[in-house]
Amino acid sequence: MPSAGRDLFQGFGMIEHRAVTASVVWRDGKGSAESASIFGHAAVFNKETTIDLSVFAFRERIAPGAFTKNIRQDDVRALFNHDPNYVLGRNRNNTLTLAEDSIGLRYEARPPKTTAAQDVRQLLIGGYVTGSSFAFSDPEDEWDESEMKKGKLPLRTIRTFGKLIDVSPVTFPAYPSADSQARSNGVTTMREKATDVRGLPLGYKRVLQSMEKNLHCRRCGKHLGLGWRTRGRYALHEHCAESFDMQRERTDLQARVEARTPAAFTRLHAAAAQLAAADRRRV
């Protein structure tokens, strides 16, 4: 499948952020304060994640070796929450070390003696901040659309990054939310409006048109068009997503019925009735 990503995101002129929940820690130096460091992983290889941009959604993973050129060439900072006012390290002055390992992109920053760095130290030691993120632009990628008729969103595999901008310990280590955005009002309207693709970048236009033609509902197997919701890596009709949510709620309630209280049984039967009613409406 031809690459669409460079044109897609260059068309927006956007800097993207990705985050991981892998632990980031503060290491106090054994010899002196100057040897203290922040250590973590800013990216994980081959971990598939759903990116939902409301009008456009896809699965994404990063291929091993994607950061090789950036580690060698780019001027990268370590920041806190991607904020340039909180600089924790820089590879050009040897206070930030970047490397790829079997997990992903590993970084170690040796922060300056600033109040901001000491604040970050307290946040990391206290467990208030536990995740990492990285900022990038102009990725080169490949798109796999072969499983869209099975209800899966297209898969974007990032092979290289045009520029690695920063790595950051972050307060909220999360990718753009799939479920929360999918449930918000106006998502379907935005996707329906996206059928008018004039003015959109070529890569965006091509993938979106392919999704309109080939994407099928994971639950009922019928053609989706552009009026869909995301649930994890899958796309569903709105009513199928509703049934999916009810089924999940019923399963959760069933797991809680272990106490066998009358109230738990009442909630379980109510959820089952709602699910049956939703299925009847779908038929």
Image (cartoon, rainbow, N blue to C red):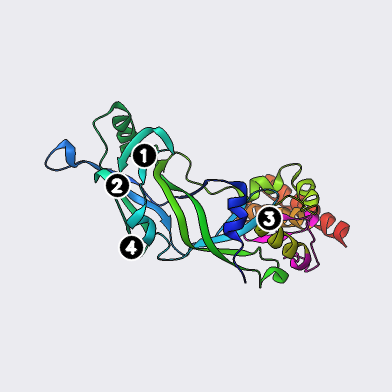
The span shown in magenta is 213-239
Tell us which disc is closer to us: 1 or 4.
4
Tell me the number on the disc at residue 127. Answer: 1
Which mark sits nearer the N-terminus, 4 or 2?
Answer: 2
Tell me the number on the disc at residue 101. Answer: 4
Answer whether labels 4 and 3 touch (C-beta < 8 Å).
Answer: no
Tell us which disc is closer to us: 4 or 2.
2
Residue type marked 4: Asp
Q: Is residue 200 visible?
A: yes
Q: Position of residue 144 (x, y in %)?
A: 61, 69
Q: Secondary structure at mark 1?
A: loop
Which mark sits nearer the N-terminus, 4 or 3?
Answer: 4
Answer whether labels 1 and 4 touch (C-beta < 8 Å).
Answer: no
Q: Is residue 237 magenta?
A: yes
**In whole angstroms, how far apart are the C-alphas of marks 3 and 1?**
32 Å
Which mark sits nearer the N-terminus, 2 or 3?
Answer: 2
The image quarter in which residue 207 lies: bottom right
| Residue denoted by label 3 | 230
**In whole angstroms, how far apart are the C-alphas of marks 1 and 2?**
26 Å
Q: Position of residue 38 (x, y in %)?
A: 29, 44
Main structural element of the magenta stretch: helix, strand or loop? loop
